Image (spheres, grey):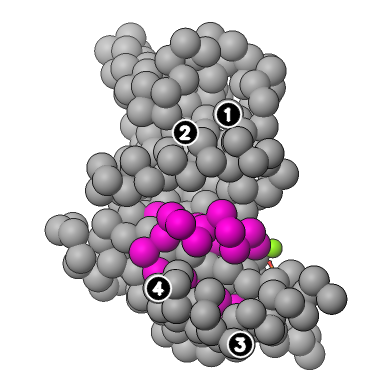
Amino acid sequence: PAKGAPLLKVEGVVKRFRGLVAVNEVSFDISAGEIVGLIGPNGAGKSTMFNLLTGTLPLSGGRIEFLGTEISGKSQKEIALMGIARTFQHVKLRPQMSVLENVALGAHARASSGFLRGGLNLDSTEEASIFAEARHQISRIGLSQRELDNAGSLPLGLQRMVEIARSLASDPMLLILDEPAAGLRKAEKRALSDLLARLREEGVTILIVEHDMEFVMNLVDRLVVMNFGTRLFEGDPAAARADCGVRAAYLGEAA
Ligand code: ADP
Ligand code: MG
């Protein structure tokens, strides 16, 4: 889709867990080429929203559309095949496999429409194109020097980048990151932020679900702020920083 075209439409989405309303009629849109941050204090409903977007949890109400097609009710696999890729809050690389093999798994997911059937047993041309794609994605994150290292031997900040490369290898139209800055040191956060800014320049559309407000502040085009399951704010980062409700929500957490 062309830059600025509507990609994702979240309309009045509700998620209830027994008595608790974890997400309460939340709406927002994402257009092609944007980086949007979905932030909020602990318990705001961010992870629940992430799980609704990726098909990990069923909705209790509302609808989600991707490229004009309703995705609410579809499985994780169907949503992934439609072009929404995700990373996990807790890095889920295969630590004993090389960086290259890990990223190749992402490329393979696309090549064989979704799921690994007994590892990487492919014919040699298919295999060559998967590894070429994996190398391309690794160069994109600047890690070509380390492609043969075991993923588990890399510092956490680089593992996060490998996760992103693996997701990009499936050639998604929307990349959703779950708390990419969690547990990273300052310098690692900066490097990750630089990488995401570069990807945006290349036209990748990204939704960052993140607790760390400072991490997203200088990076995103737009922020959606949640608190107690509702959408508290939507707008540009400078306006979010100045918004009394947003400040109170984050201060309330610090207290
Ligand atoms: P965040 O990611 O913003 O910290 P969550 O989406 O994890 O917030 O949680 C929002 C609310 O929903 C919290 O009150 C949490 O306890 C509750 N919650 C999340 N997942 C479940 C679940 N599977 N069962 C019951 N309650 C849940
Ligand atoms: Mg969470």
Q: Earlier in the sequence, mark 2 or mark 1?
A: 1
Residue type of the residue flagged with mark 2: Arg
Q: Earlier in the sequence, mark 4 or mark 1?
A: 1
Mark number displayed over residue 87: none
Mark 3 residue crowding within 10 angstroms, few (<14) / some (14–19) / many (20+): some
Whether 176 is drawn above or below 20: the answer is above
In the rendered image, the quadrant that contains the N terminus is: bottom left
Rendered residue at 38%/34% (across/down): 169
x 45%, y 70%: residue: 237
> In the image, what residue type sits under mark 1?
Leu
Q: Earlier in the sequence, mark 2 or mark 3?
A: 2
Residue furthest right in the image? 255
User: Hey, what amino acid is under mark 3?
Assistant: Gly
Q: Which residue is mark 3?
A: 245
67 up-or-down from 87: above or below: below
Residue that badge 4 annotates: 236
Mark 4 and mark 2: span between their CA atoms? 29 Å
Sequence order check, earlier mark of 3 and 1? 1
Marks 2 and 3 close (CB-CB < 8 Å): no
Residue labelled with disc 2: 166
Residue receiving disc 1: 158
Amino acid carrying mark 4 in the image: Asp
Q: Residue at x 60, y 36 (%)?
A: 188
